[in-house]
Image (cartoon, coloured by chain):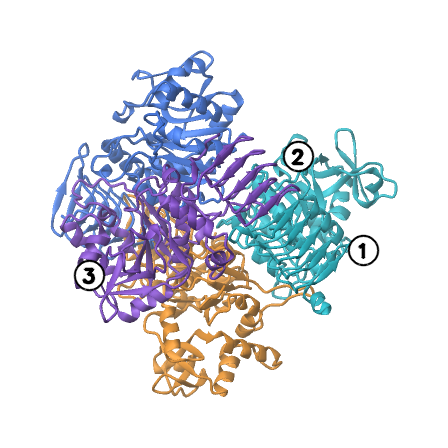
Chain colours: A purple, B blue, C orange, D cyan
Amino acid sequence: MNTLMGLINLEHEHDFLEELTYFRCGAAAPFAGRYRLIDFTLSNMVKTRIEEVAVFTNTKYRSLMDHVGTGADWELARRHGGLFILPPDWNDPTDISRGDLRHFHNNRDYFHRSKADHVLVSGSQFVANTDFDEAFQHHLDTGADVTLVSVQLDKSLPEHVPQLRLETNEAGQVINLTNDQENKHAFTNVYIIKKEVLLRLVDQCIAFHKDHFLFHGIKENLHDLHAEYYQYEGYSFFVNSIESFFRHNMNLLDPDPYRELFFKNEYVRTKISNEPPVKYRETADVKDSLLANGSVIDGDVHNSVLFRGVKVKKGAVVKNSIILQRCIIEEDVHLENVILDKDVRISSGQTFIGSKDKPFVVAKRKQI
Amino acid sequence: MNTLMGLINLEHEHDFLEELTYFRCGAAAPFAGRYRLIDFTLSNMVKTRIEEVAVFTNTKYRSLMDHVGTGADWELARRHGGLFILPPDWNDPTDISRGDLRHFHNNRDYFHRSKADHVLVSGSQFVANTDFDEAFQHHLDTGADVTLVSVQLDKSLPEHVPQLRLETNEAGQVINLTNDQENKHAFTNVYIIKKEVLLRLVDQCIAFHKDHFLFHGIKENLHDLHAEYYQYEGYSFFVNSIESFFRHNMNLLDPDPYRELFFKNEYVRTKISNEPPVKYRETADVKDSLLANGSVIDGDVHNSVLFRGVKVKKGAVVKNSIILQRCIIEEDVHLENVILDKDVRISSGQTFIGSKDKPFVVAKRKQI
Amino acid sequence: MKKQCVGMLLAGGEGKRLGLLTKDLAKPAVPFGGKYRIIDFTLSNCSNSGIQTVGVLTQYSPLVLHKHIGIGKPWDMDRQFDGLTILSPYTAKRGGSWYSGTADAIYQNIHYIDQYDPDYILVISGDHIYQMNYDDLIQHHEEKQSDATISVIEVPWEEASRFGILNTKDNLEIYEFDEKPKEPKNNLASMGIYIFNWKTLRSYLLDDAEQTDSDHDFGKDIIPAMLNDGKRMFAYRFEGYWKDVGTIQSYWEANMDLLEEDLSVSLNNKEWRTYSQDVNYPPQFLDSRAVVENSLINSGSWISGTVKNSILFQCVEVGTGTTINKSIIHPHVKIGKNCTIERAIIMENVVIPDNTVIDGTKETEPVVINDEYVEQLT
Amino acid sequence: MKKQCVGMLLAGGEGKRLGLLTKDLAKPAVPFGGKYRIIDFTLSNCSNSGIQTVGVLTQYSPLVLHKHIGIGKPWDMDRQFDGLTILSPYTAKRGGSWYSGTADAIYQNIHYIDQYDPDYILVISGDHIYQMNYDDLIQHHEEKQSDATISVIEVPWEEASRFGILNTKDNLEIYEFDEKPKEPKNNLASMGIYIFNWKTLRSYLLDDAEQTDSDHDFGKDIIPAMLNDGKRMFAYRFEGYWKDVGTIQSYWEANMDLLEEDLSVSLNNKEWRTYSQDVNYPPQFLDSRAVVENSLINSGSWISGTVKNSILFQCVEVGTGTTINKSIIHPHVKIGKNCTIERAIIMENVVIPDNTVIDGTKETEPVVINDEYVEQLT
């Protein structure tokens, strides 16, 4: 059937968020007040009416499993289809596959069971709020083997360096993926591929002991494939470093990016946590900030992002900071350019100041 | 609250079923036509109205995850509570815990989040169809720290050898766990423990670098604990070897054990698979057998257990055998004392004969 | 929440001609095929066709039906905001009444449909046995740019006068609807499966509701009115097994059809599963005296006798020395020793004493056995 | 499927004294507390008390209420066989009618309760704000070996004559029920929360249904009849916050109560969560001109003005220069620039133009603003 199944392949995403990825994979990193990075990709897939999504995980996938649970909050708790977190657990002594090919090899069933004829593959570092209906329609209309989703980079940012670039011919087909930093036509690591082509390339990669499906299965075979691209025009960005993580959280404190990301399309789905509305007390002074539910504010919060259930006590000042869920900022604390991972408690009177380029990061559950 | 939470601890269960546990842990081994071993423990917990169950897995847990899915088929797909398969994935460099203590240490949250004050701990090798209401009531009435569920062994079977025995004093309290084969009062590896006691013993084990909660946390501390027992009287057995696996499957072909295990209490829950009723064709000759839905029978099936979706073609004879799901027995095959793992296809005309003590086992997906 | 297509499943029929079988049971809830209820086939069609927003319109004896459907879990329709919704006749402050016709049933639930703002409405009924991909029907509808598309099946010419016949041009455009024509011009019978553009249908429903002389029926009122206005209406030709189980004889035949090898309705089709409640009964047990041939038997059953050409539901017990032939045995029936059962339908939970003989071979229809029948025997 | 206790939640009230707020909305569906609807408090009580089989009896304007409850996912009651069931008045073949009283509502659903064969029935209503562990009530009921137990709250003596008062012995055994007594002998008011032994209640319901002069009401008919027969009936003393939001004034007060610090109904209580639909709106945005004090604001809101002593639901926009005080702003309201809003309740989706002044400080009750009100303004 001309329908899509989803694959979020995290095998080759390294732990790019320093303290924030000591205990969780990048896809599970919190973002924008109430989300995890994977929520954007997962929500985009659901908006594209994809009903089965597999996640190839590498390590530190426990918080990912906790977060997505049964998939119910993405309407993916299905009896048929649904959401499958697939950790690396295989025991076939005859298995010769390597790298992410081990996932493809050991989860071949997932692809065979589905009635879908096309697969939408994605990582977790490309952030946008969209559906891929138009990209898929382009893929179907052109009869492509694979359609790469791309963006035009209008300025150069550090996080763009590792993103591959698309080299196209006159017919608009993709003939190579390069590292040419001058080329502003960047690949998002999101692509749509015919299921039969995917399975054929997987077999080929395994036969030649390859370990990276994108590089060896797709890039090295572009000469043989009908590869199209679909350029995404909406608001989007990449998060692949602590610096880009900080900057793109802060960007959302501008009204335009906030509206672009959250109000241009259906809401981004995430885990439901039943927090009550934010409580602002008499002494609260909150400006230029994003706040998630469950927070209780007595102090000053300026130019900051507060996740769910944060307490800011009287006299405390939080500036240019990102405070993850359930942190407690006691009285008269002063924080500036700080990232607190979840469940951190800052005892009263203390001051912590980082810089915009090098925010001060505190790992989770610390009491300082 | 005087309620129970559940824990299925598979850390120290070795892969006891030879070919059947090459690719899956023992708890995920198929049993009795449509079940997996874990179904019995899980169903018993649900019958005891336990609403949150954690499973500590070691390796080869993928088929276990596939089988239990969201937990919906056990009514454990909850927004609050539910079923948690907890694979070993931890990354705390400061963690000094070992053995199953790593699970307890890294999943401490699970115990803290629950409102239950008592924990029902179990492995997967004790098979019965019951609830633990009486055992729990005994535990509450006596105010015990820990209550061990036991059985009286009326005959000696090979699978009883590794089962620990209960040494009790005049007051009926458990003072030791021994390996005394003369003692017929055997421990089932099922016990109820106060949550606070469990967490205290966990801390103690970790502090002394211990690696086995039952041996070091409970057995070594019995002198300090108020330990009671509850002797289970209903039909039950242990499956911890290929020989006991084969024998106890076959025992169910006697009407009495079949009725005792399946009709004395509510039905044992398992994964729903929407197979149609068994189709017996004109030439079918089936006697003394258990058949699960989805099977289509043209041949002879005698004294055998057929799992879901098995096809036995014309002229084929299946005797004293256990045929796992979706096997295809082509025409004129002769099988006797054989165990076929799932998705095996036996091509026409072949004969395979094992013995009762040493059944011929074929690993999954083989085509022979 | 925009939806492309919302399904409206008419499940309120009394099924009077099914006699005892529908005495306390809505027709769509009647057990069928050893494991299912009749409505499972339609619900599974929806699920397999990707139609996940379905209103089920019930009215007659809905208790068992409601319990069977529950929140729609087996069909993956247990969703918080769309999924399956049971629509019983609404009681307003000044009272309520049953739906007065198929069109009225949809009319009364316009508010339910409107909340999804669908392009199309699929109208189906819950009392036919068939396997059909409604998505093919929708695609046909879209290709023809039709206002309404009606699924039809070819029937033998000599039987055509028993059906609602659609007279079509070569391109399958419908120009006339003939309800049970004495002299049929065509042999394409309506299957009672419709796709409508919702906007179009909505206005016809509003008009029709105001007609006091209308039966508020799709076949009698809505379709003719649309034809009259020159709307684009096409037939969609369905090829495959389709059976209305309207009488005890046809109910029995349709069950027996499942024992045929070459039937296009296959319960074993992995690509088109038929979903139902599955209650975790243990595997079935055949003892040393069991003889079973050409039969379907469901889980939890215990067979010690001879079963031929029959369909046994879950947890049926058949005693030693008993012979069952050409019969349908509903769930949890216990049949004693040395009985002979021929061409019978035994209803749920009935206990048949030892040495009972039930012979339905001489009746015009198979005999239906309930508790009262058994009491009279003894 | 045996259950210890089945909850029956009466959610059919019109709530006439809530005026505009219940014009097209059942009272239990009225938005409350910045994120919730009134019924969420009772449903969360059930969920937190371990009562997972709940029949919700609806009748007046149930559409929004039904949509809000859905299949009960937020309260973990989305189960195939038990969980939450919406029980609307059933339309039988010869028509149907609304429940004629609280006892009649239960009587009409005896078949629903019977299928679970419960020991106890918990009867509650969906229009009070409180947090209560019904399990404590059941334990009290069991300890007293009671036939019926009624939850009571102490009210000031001078207000006792406005309530249904239970006169009890020292051990809390009830010997008399006084509906709005002129000279109260006691100050324990019934909260309309009952535990009954199902077998006992069932027979009283059957008797009561035959009395043509009965109001079929628990307070007026069932309780007095049971007292009359000398049944063992005890009061259970509830200590904590409990409020009937029956009028616009009390609705407004109960909302404002949530801004108090020491309230025993705490939305932030992790041990007793209040569950509701949560629609994944983004975090709220406060811009550089925002001033917010002593207020509750829900997700998706956008604040550029001043908000004091108020409760704002999801996706409310407050323009620059606007001041809101002592008000309740329902979901998706857009308030323009330079407005002044005092002591008002603004209803869902209303758009307030720039420079609007709404002052409810001089009215006896807070002013309720809907679209028509805004049209008249301009």
Q: Secondary structure at mark 2?
A: helix
Q: Secondary structure at mark 1?
A: loop
Residue B295, position in %: x, y? 28, 52
Q: Which residue is mark 3?
A: A222
Q: Which residue appears farthest toward the right when viewing the image?
A: D183
Pick the front one: D219 or D221? D219
Residue C206, position in %: x, y? 58, 77
Categorize mark 3 by other alpha carbons within 10 Å: few (<14), some (14-19), many (20+).
some
Chain holding disc 2: D
Circles 2 and 3: CB distance less than 8 Å? Answer: no
Q: Which residue is mark 1?
A: D362
Q: Amino acid at mark 1?
A: Lys
Q: Which residue is mark 2?
A: D141
Residue B266, position in %: x, y? 44, 40
Categorize mark 1 by other alpha carbons within 10 Å: few (<14), some (14-19), many (20+).
few
Q: CA distance from mark 2 to mark 1?
A: 48 Å
Q: Amino acid at mark 2?
A: His
Residue at image coords 68%, 58% = D346
Residue B159, position in %: x, y? 27, 27
